[in-house]
Image: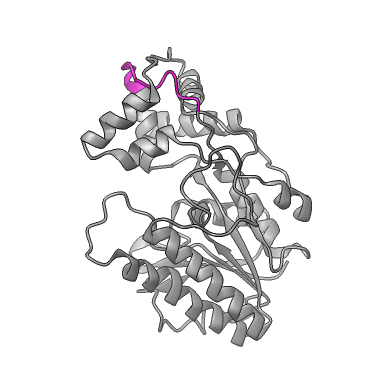
Amino acid sequence: MKKLLVTGAGGFVGQALCSTLKRRDIEFLPVYRKEQKPEINSFIISDINESTDWSLALKNIDVVIHLAARVHVMNEETDDPLSNFRALNVDATINLAKQAAQLGARRFVYVSSIKVNGEKTTDVPFTAFDMPAPIDPYGQSKYEAEFALKELSDATGLEVVVVRPPLVYGPGVRANFLRLMKLVKLGMPLPFGAIRNCRSMVALDNLIDLLIVCADHDNASGNTFLVSDGHDLSTTELLIMLANAMDKRSMLLPFPSGLLAGGAALIGKAAIANRLLDSLQVDIAHTTAVLNWVPIVGVEEAINSTVAHFLNHG
């Protein structure tokens, strides 16, 4: 494998990806925002937008792994969130990809989101071949970027690989997963003892391993890959596993899902409740068949390491 460019190197996935690339002795150049206290051997950028000059960063780069994005936010405060998402997730992405193609890069690995498929599943898991059905501005912007990258690939020959992860967890995880760990650590009774949903997640180690495979595998070009641990959990099962990892007794009360959903809607927390109550499953059969890839860590091991980091670092 030749040299990689990693954008978003200071983020949750980016930091772990760069650590793994170092450990595997793969040559790469990380891209950091100037306020992120980057390493000496890195490319520092003040802003990523539709006019950013990437020429110095892309010198001798064979593959770009593009992680930098405006991520999903639960409480959007702007009047036009779609425009803000498009600015970074679409316009800035295509600007980078165009320059990569012009300067000789062979492949562009784009980390998208399962939100391109939709927000929830019922009886059938999402696949890479489903008609896209994004609901919110974040998912819409990711879909638009995927579409624009395909057009660019057709026009230039740049090999584009799209990866759509669901919830990513691992040491240092934040947002909803961190909130769940904090609740379990408190040992307080939680009303989630009767949730029978199924949700796919992906451990940080598994996602990173797949991204590295996508950067070099002969069969990856032109494909969209869904990724997960291959072991789906209900919210109830997840909370029990978190409690076990903390050597705590799980205090889960069997409240009906409908009651929880109704109560959350009354207090304006429907979106958070949906992530706890709805199912969201992904089918990774296409990924495993095309790339001969399987998750390198199991769910229990990944949850244990995530919890251990949380207990040690808060």
Asked whether residue 188 is drawn in magenta, I would say yes
Percent coordinates x, y for residue 155 in the rendering: 64, 85
> On the rendered structure, is 55 left or right of 20?
left
Q: Position of residue 249 (x, y in %)?
A: 43, 12
Can residue 68 be seen here?
A: no
Relative to 263, residue 294 above or below:
below
Name the residue at 59% across, 28% down. Answer: 300
Residue 306 lies in magenta, yes or no?
A: no
> How far from the left and from the top, in percent, is residue 77?
22, 58
Residue at position x 26%, y 56% in the image: 76
For image coordinates 31% across by 17% down, the residue present is 188
From the viewer's perspective, tell me whether residue 259 is left or right of residue 234: left
**Quarter where residue 311 is shown:** top left
The image's colour scheme reads one colour
The image shows a total of numbered marks equal to 0
> Dominant secondary structure of the magenta stretch?
loop
Figure check: 301 above or below 73: above
Q: Can residue 199 be seen in this snapshot? A: yes
Asked whether 215 or 150 is in front, the reply is: 150
Which quadrant: the C terminus?
A: top left
Q: Quick one: 84 or 19, which is closer to the camera?
A: 84
Depicted 222 relative to depicted 182: above or below? below
Q: Residue at x 53, y 31 (%)?
A: 303
Q: Where does the image place residue 74, in percent across and percent down from the top left?
A: 31, 49
In this picture, is 48 found above or below 20? below
Q: Which residues lie in the magenta part?
A: 185-196
- Viewport quadrant of the N terminus: bottom right
